[in-house]
Amino acid sequence: MCLSRCWTRSALYADGPWLHTTGPERVDGSLSEAFSACTLERLFRMLYRQVKRQLINDIQTGFAAPGAALPNEKDLAQRFQVSVGTVRRAVDELVAEHVLLRQQGRGTFVGKLDRERFMFQFFKIVPRDRPSEFPEVRLHKFAKSRATQVESQALGLHGNQWVFRIENVLHLQGQPVIHDRIAIAAAMFPGLNQASFTARTTTIYGHYQAAFGVTIVEADERVRAELVAADSARLLHLDEGAPVLRIDRVAHTFDRKPAEFRSSIVDTRNFDYVSRMRETA
């Protein structure tokens, strides 16, 4: 950090409880002598990132529950002892990352991984000639076993760790279209079982968030064409060896920590994979 040892607390409101110096305070008001432009920029980045990290921690610990309103920026600035501008920068980034939701005239809320969010951000299989629809998800298998090498690599696991394996068949327009295989680390989802998973009243990602405090914020996907294997062919009512689309997804929580590895086999005879590109500010 290129912080000067001589600086004025009164000259920079956004110092907060995190930053301290050991040198004497400067009281002549000549901020330019104490700080370079580099120092000010780095200081601002440090402050808003610390505010952002604390807001993320509030969400992870359940202090700020999914769907809950965030305090206004002035109150947050007072809590963190930083400027309103510093708080706004942190909140703006979390809104851009879909962690927070800003509603005009109402305030800012912790994002919920509900159906609308799932369809907007994570579900990309769309009927070729009809509007998109939310899939009907039917559980096929639920088990707990040791992670394979591929699962360990995708989830960042070390050693012989346990994972939950979940297989679902997703129906669109009344027909089986997607065979999902999901692997998640048992240590990240303690107490998960088939009964609670089946009884969930929200999306799978919503269940991760509400029951275990694991918020999925982004995902990386690899897509390729392949020939369908026997088990997926049977579930999707396809001939073995028919062409299908395979999507391998690693879903991440905060700090790009892997939370889920999912392989999806998709019957694309009447459905397309649609990636929505949106311009960001």
Image (cartoon, rainbow, N blue to C red):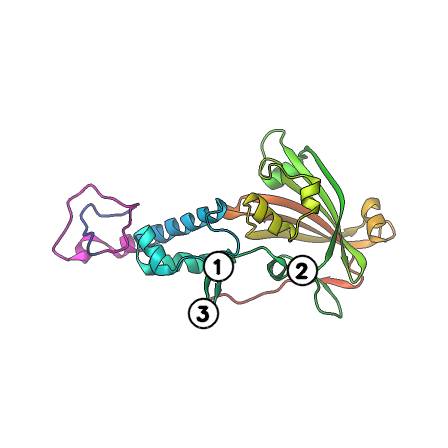
Dots 3, 1 in contact, CB < 8 A = no
Q: Which element is circle 2 on?
A: loop
Residue 127 visible in the snapshot:
yes
Q: Nearer the viewer, mark 2 or mark 1?
A: 1
Q: Main secondary structure of the magenta part?
A: loop
User: What span is in magenta?
Assistant: 12-41
Question: Residue lying furthest top in this view?
Answer: 160
The disc at residue 53 is: none
- Give how far across and how far down residue 29 sits, in percent: 14, 57
Which residue ends up furthest to the right in the rendered image?
239
Residue drawn at x 59%, y 35% is: 187
Which numbered marker is on residue 124?
2
Q: Residue under circle 3?
A: 105
Give the amino acid type for the residue marked by disc 2 in the picture. Answer: Lys
Q: Is residue 33 magenta?
A: yes
Q: Is residue 40 magenta?
A: yes
